Image: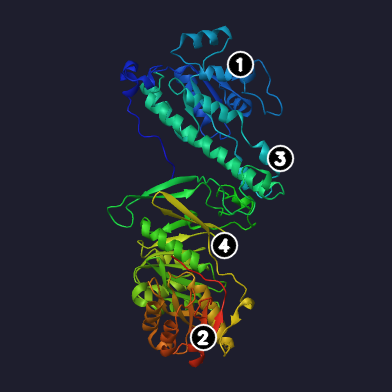
Amino acid sequence: MTDRIDPIDPTIASTTDPSTNPAIKQNATPIIKRALLSVTDKTGLVDFARALQDEFGIEVVSTGGTAKVLADAGIAVVPIEEVTGFPEMLDGRVKTLHPKVHGGLLARRDLAAHLEQAAEHDIGLIDLVVVNLYAFEATVARPDASYDQVIENIDIGGPSMLRSAAKNHAAVTVVCRPQDYDTVLAEMRANAGATSFATRQQLATRVFALTSAYDRAIFDWLSVQLSETDNAAESVVFAEKSAPFPGELYLSLGKVKDLRYGENPHQPAAFYRFSDASADVSFGPALLVSPSTSAVASSDSPPFVLAKAHKLQGKELSYNNYLDLDAAWAAVREFAQPTCVIVKHLTPCGIASASDGDLVAAYRCAFECDTVSAFGGVMAFNRALNRAVVESIFENGQFVEALVAPSVDAAAQELLGEKPSIRVLATGGISAPGGGVDYRSIEGGMLLMRSDAAQEDPSGFTVASKRPPTAAERDGLLFAWKACKSVKSNAILLAQGTATVGIGAGQPNRVNSAELAVRQAGEKSRGAVASSDAFMPFADSLEVLAEAGVTALIQPGGSIRDAEVLAAADAANMAVLFTGHRHFRH
């Protein structure tokens, strides 16, 4: 979805009295007589220029490749070198940086001195500027782009012309994207070749948004290059070399769409995404890299983020859908085996992996963990969604809000089409967990942290109890540990094999979470293994698990009462692994 200028009132240009508004006193209805066109994106260019010339008799000045395209289309063009008296030089680096260009853009029409100076130096006024910029971000996104190629795609003349024209929007109309051609022509047709101040102001605002984002993208890319050298500590861009975050943070996001409402119907909401959400956000030694350029510094495999997932069918996604899908997608990426994660209200109510590669089995085990909570939840899969899985969902009579997977095969799509209200998203692939940044807002500010990923080396885990876990228990504990990190803290999770059977989440104390988990698991608690996202501060939580028949536990350790907790484990003949790391999820 692209944003656009608000609809134009055709009466504005002809009825506005400049004397009543100082902001537009220069000229409320500047008739466009001369235009400068210099664009990278040639979409719609010829038709727009032909309309300017044929309908309004406007003189068209142009540069390089743009001039050639127009001339080849039979449009009369004044080459820029005839205006400046200088040829384009330095491989095109210098062509519009000249007083006869910027004087024509910046001269105030309401000041006699400006007009006299322009006439004295033979500077013709320019009333319309159409410029878009070198494709810098597209260049840096190419894995084969060299440093020199990226540098040559830093536009200098384009932003300069845009800024000059936008500054003088009291008299100059400036267009920085093809989507606005029709809007400008419609207003000119309605106003005898003039544009209104309201439109020029909107167009100028769009220009400064563009140049700001463009400069930010260049800064981000150069900062990545700097972070990979030994000179990082010498740059004012960086704080102390060991610091993981910059002194100032700028984020560039584009509005995708308005949502029906937020968490509740009385709360307005909208969905934004980073300027290039196909790249994950990563850190240099001391600098946050924006999503528009981090692909340069990240792995060769492209990240497949939820914000750019393709919606195959279904109702519009809600604010809550996005949050739940994000939690499910983050959780399912933790697992190498075919896995299903079911999420309700931002926490999993079922997670299962299939050791035999059967995605249907993974779904069924995840669903069986909590069939009540699964109703109305969202689901994520880390393999292509196939018809057999969809059939199983329908056989269970499960109401599903949304599904997300790397892809959905044709047979599954056909069957899902029988329930068109289900939202179905395909991300195009799946990335390794972690490697990004989590952003959380607080009133008046924002918190940032590196995203969490349970990728510890299990060989570093220690057996803390007298009895070591059996091989089967160890496998179950490693699954439970990965699953537990996606559960809201304080989290206690019970698993049988590679499937959750009980989840206690979001409780203000850990013993309540343990009681919830064993209550949900019921008889499946017996012989199950358990994970705790943080250390157990007292033995009470472990005692709840032991009484329910849990045989092994994995937890970070590190409590001042570890000895007390381990004594209770040994008394119950429970095996305990310490990981040394916690995984809170607030």
Q: Are marks 2 and 4 in contact (CB under 8 Å)?
A: no
Q: Residues within 10 Å of mark 3 (few under 14, many from 20)?
A: few
Residue 409 visible in the snapshot:
no
Q: How many marks?
A: 4
Q: Are marks 1 and 4 in contact (CB under 8 Å)?
A: no
Where disc 4 sits, the SS reads loop
Q: Are marks 2 and 1 in contact (CB under 8 Å)?
A: no
Q: Which mark is residue 566?
A: 2
Which amino acid does the dot numbered 1 rest on? Val
Image quadrant of residue 578?
A: bottom right
Residue 462 visible in the snapshot:
yes
* Image position of 277 with respect to 470: above or below: above
The disc, 2 or 4, on the residue closer to the chain's N-terminal end is: 4
Query: Which corner quadrant holds the N terminus?
Result: top left
The residue that disc 3 covers is 148
Please indicate whether residue 203 sits to the left or right of residue 242 in the image.
Answer: left
Where disc 2 sits, the SS reads helix
